[in-house]
Amino acid sequence: MTLQAILAGHAFTRGLGPDQLAELAAMACKVTFEEDQLILEDRGKSQWFYLVIAGSVTVELRTASYAVSVEAVGPGQAFGWSALLEDHDSLFGVRAREHTVALRLDGASLKALCHKDPTLGTELLSRVLQLVAGRVRATEVRFAEMCGVRA
């Protein structure tokens, strides 16, 4: 299966036009991660945006004393949205829960493509905002659970 076909079927990019998918496919590469592999370190510079194809990762908040899994991210979902922001450290760490396959896109190239194609940029911005809102909600629910409050 080609990268463009994978993108056409991925929930995050589904519905984009063939030319837009071709542009994304040109900057994408397939990557794999093994169970417990650290993919993205919290408070680190995020360079990559990922679309999960198979397997799953956990988005986590980490301190010196503990780590809290905020949300599991699986096929059809995405992570690494901070790679699309200028000079913004990642807020979450991401670790593979199992053998995981994803498409990796360079954040700077993706951002440049969004400026070049404002229609695509607007659509991707909307999708990324949904991703961010979901992550905030998952964090809220997880902390409510830790405090014994039903969210």
Image: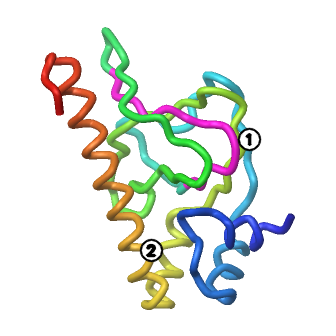
Snapshot quadrant of residue 126: bottom left
* Callout 1–callout 2 Cβ contact below 8 Å: no
Circle 1 residues within 10 Å: few <14, some 14–19, many ≥20:
some
Mark 2 — residue? 124
In the rendered view, would you say 149 is above or below 132? Answer: above
Q: Residue at x 50, y 90 (%)?
A: 117
The foreground one among 96 and 138 is 138
Horizontally, residue 84 falls left or right of residue 20, namely left
Which residue in the structure is indicated by mark 1? 32
**In x, y percent, where is residue 19?**
67, 89
Give the color scheme: rainbow, by chain, secondary structure or one colour: rainbow
Residue 140's tag is none
Q: Residue at x 66, y 81 (%)?
A: 23
Quarter the N terminus occupies: bottom right
Q: Is residue 110 left or right of residue 26?
A: left
Residue 66 point in image, percent of width and height? 34, 12
Q: Examine the residues drawn in magenta and state their main secondary structure.
A: strand
Are there few (<14), some (14-19), or many (20+) residues within 10 Å of tag 2? some
* Residue placed most toward the observer, 131 or 95: 131
Magenta highlight on residue 96? no
The amino acid on which the numbered mark 2 sits, given as a three-letter code, is: Leu
Residue 56 forms part of the magenta stretch: yes
**Foreground of the two, 131 or 36:** 131
Magenta segment range? Answer: 50-62
Where disc 1 sits, the SS reads strand
Residue 7, picture quadrant: bottom right
Up-down relation of residue 13 to residue 95 (above or below): below
Q: Is residue 55 left or right of residue 45?
A: right
Q: Which residue is depicted at the point 60% across and 36% down? A: 56
**Residue 53 drawn at (x, y percent):** 68, 51
Lower position in the chain sequence, tag 1 or tag 2: 1
